[in-house]
Each structure stands twice: as structure tokens, then as C-alpha cells.
Image: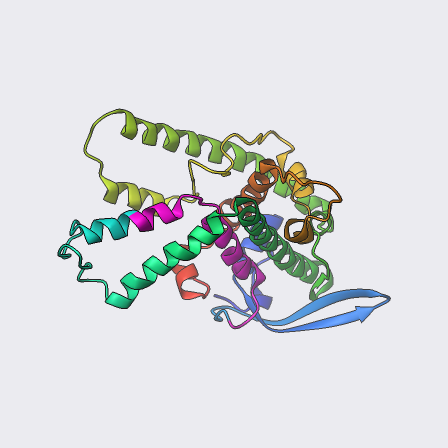
Amino acid sequence: MANYATLPEEQSWIAYLRARLPYSFKRIKEQRAGGERRFVLSEPEPDLGAEYHNFWRRGHVYYASGLILDRPGLSDFWLQHITAAALGLLPGAAQGGYPWDWPPHTFFNVIQMEKAWQFAMANHIDRERVVMTSCVQAVELCLKAIQAHVAYRQHGEFSFRAGHHVERLYRDLPDSLREELIAESRAFAEDYSTHRARLSSDIDNLMRFEQQVDWAAIRKDTLDSAYTVFLDGTDPGGLDLSEDWLDRAMSETRDGEYHRYSPDESKDEYPVQQIAYGLTLGRFLYEHLFPISLRESASGRSP
């Protein structure tokens, strides 16, 4: 990867950002001027590890965590796996034993994960609040990463204004960039809806007809696909993704404080639509617009 200062000036904002978001910064400094706080980043370099500052990449971990936390049936898999081991149904496991390619402490920790997840499952509304706290943090960090590179293009300095309100961060972006984002959001809505409908039909057919399932092929297709799709829970299967969905999502998502504290005077129903919008924003930013490859995610470094 080239020195940041020598990167070509792409015509579109999206191309400009895709080339620059993988760069991490060695330093970050808070500044205050005229009652306004902002953060200034410096020394961008490629191929830096996660100990340095890359809010786009860091936000991706928050988004992935939100996806995992939104899976209410996750503990069922662990329970079934333990049961299969106890019955000797797993390869290499005698009855009452464990699979030989798993050391005992790893197998024991799976049981501990099942136990911990049951506590989270017992309070599903608060679990959903944590899902959205992670999603909002992911969107916030991505928008701040975008702002830093935009500021450099406009003013020659990597900076973003302090604050945690997602919609305000979005409105701070240049009009020309928001126009590109809206255009991309419409392309995403069509692509993702088509992809999800096909997968839903494929899985329904597997359940409807008795047939041999090639799970290895399904796993490969899933890992190779740009998108994640969950076919249950609050994943946005029936969400309205008409032309102005991006503006609605930015408004509905609110800020992290609402999802942590629910500062309403009366009963808060915590509508599922907000969670669906949060997951969709994360999917749009981190899977469609500025994706991070599995290889990069595993290494914590830029490709």
C-alpha cells in the first residue's frame, strides 16, 4: 500500500474512502476551541495492528458483536453439541467423552458459554439494548473514520468533532457525500433484499423436501458472500427499505444513551424496528459499502 500522501485523488467520495479507510493512525489528540471539542489524528500508515487507531476496523468488531448477541437461539447449538458428545455421536468421542480434537478445557468452556448465554437470554429486552448499543457504536465509529478522511481532503487535517449522536454525525458530512451514500443505499436495498429472498427460499426448500444437504458447500457460499443473513429474530427481513430508508434509519437509531438507559418517563416498549434499522445500518456500512475481509479481520491488519 502506498504512502497516504501519494494516493490518487479519486473522483467519487466512495472510491476515495475505500482506498483510505484501511490506513491506521499512530496518534490521536483531543483539542478544544471556542467551546467545541474535536479529535485530531496523525501519522497514517498501512498495515498497522489493532493497537493503533482505526475506527472503521474497530467499529466492525462492535457490529459483529451485535450480530452475535442478536441470536436468541445461540445456546441451543451449544446444548445440542454437548448432548451429542455425551451420547458419543461426535467423531472421535466415546459415550460420555469429548471429541479428540478438542482439549478438555475447551470443551468445558463451551458449557460455561452455554451457562453465560442463558443469563443473557433470560432478559431479552436488555439483551436487545446491548445489541443496539453495539450497533450504534459501530455506526458512530465508522462515521467518525469517514469524517477524518473527509476533513483531510477538505482542510488538510484528519479530524472529527466530538459527540455520539449518529444522525448528527451523518448530517455533518458534505452534501455531495451524503448524495453518494443515499445512491449506494438504494443499490444495497435491492442487492440485499434479492440475496436474502433467495437464501430464505433455499433454506425453506431444505426443510420441505427430504434430501442430502451439502453443508460444506453452504458454508463456503456463506463465507464467500458479501452479506450476512439470519432468518429469525430481529434481523431485518421485513424492514421497509424504500428509497429514503437511510435517512429514516439514521433518525430512528438515535444515540447510544437511549439504548443504554431508556430515558423515558414511562414504560418503554423498545420497538423491534429500531433494532432492525441498527443492524441494517451496520450491514450497509460494513458489508456493502466498506467491507472488511475475513482475512483482514482475523489478522487485525490491512490487506
| Residue in the foreground of this view, choosing between 97 and 244 | 97
Residue at 37% x, 33% y is: 199
Colour scheme in use: rainbow
- Residue 59 percent coordinates (x, y): 55, 57
- Residue 284 percent coordinates (x, y): 54, 44
Is residue 62 shown in magenta? yes
Residue at 53% x, 34% y is: 189
Is residue 152 shown in magenta? no
- Residue 45 percent coordinates (x, y): 54, 70
Residue furthest out toward the top: 208
Instruction: Kindly indicate the quadrant of the structure image that contains residue 35.
Output: bottom right
Q: Which residues are magenta?
A: 51-79
Instruction: Kindly indicate the quadrant of the structure image that contains residue 162.
Output: bottom right
Q: Is residue 214 left or right of residue 162?
A: left
| The C terminus, quarter of image | bottom left
- Give the vertical position of 286 relative to 42 (above or below): above
- Give the vertical position of 163 relative to 5 (above or below): above
Labels in figure, total = 0
| Residue in the foreground of this view, choosing between 111 and 22 | 111
- Residue 236 percent coordinates (x, y): 52, 36
Q: Is residue 249 visible?
A: yes
Residue at 24% x, 66% y is: 104
Q: Is residue 178 left or right of residue 185?
A: right
Q: Is residue 177 left or right of residue 222?
A: right
Q: Is residue 11 visible?
A: no
**What type of secondary structure mainly makes up the magenta span?**
helix
